[in-house]
Image (spheres, rainbow, N blue to C red):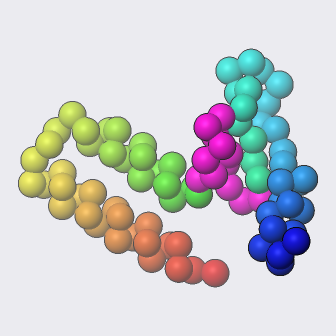
Amino acid sequence: MGLKQKAMSSILSAKRELSDEAKWDGFYMVGDRLCLPTGQLVQPQQIILAMALLELGAHPDVQVNSKIGRIARKLNELRSIP
C-alpha cells in the first residue's frame, strides 16, 4: 500500500457524522472536508462559492460575472494559505 493510500485510509477511518437526523444521512466529515452522499469531498471554500453562485444565479449580467471572478480569485488565495 502506497503512502497516499495509507494516508487516505487513516483519514477515512476518522470520519465524523454531522447529525443523527435522517436528512443528514450520507453526509460526514473526513478530516477537514465534507463528504457528500455522492462520495465527493468538498472544501469549505467550494461550499462558499457554490452558495454565492446560487445567490447570484438569478441575475446573469456583467457585474455578477465580475463579482464571481473576484470571489473565485479570493477563494484561490485562501486555498494556498497553509
Image quarter hosting the N terminus? bottom right
Q: Residue at x 77, y 53 (%)?
A: 30
Q: Residue at x 13, y 54 (%)?
A: 63
Q: Please state the horizontal and vertical placement of residue 2, each as a whole percent of the image.
A: 83, 76
Horizontally, is 48 left or right of 21 in the view?
left
Q: Is residue 26 above or below residue 3?
A: above
Q: Please state the horizontal and vertical placement of residue 80, each as a whole percent of the image.
A: 53, 79
- In the picture as drawn, the residue positioned furthest to the front comes out as 1
Image quarter hosting the C terminus? bottom right
Front residue of 35/23: it is 35
Q: Residue at x 18, y 51 (%)?
A: 64
The answer to whether residue 55 is magenta is no
Q: Residue at x 68, y 55 (%)?
A: 33
Front residue of 19/12: it is 12
Q: Please state the horizontal and vertical placement of residue 5, each as a whole percent of the image.
A: 81, 68
Horizontally, is 42 left or right of 18 in the view?
left
Front residue of 9/81: it is 9
- Highlighted magenta segment, given as a residue range: 31-42
- In the picture as drawn, the residue positioned furthest to the top comes out as 22
Question: Quarter-wise, where is residue 76 in the image?
Answer: bottom left
Horizontally, is 79 left or right of 72 in the view?
right
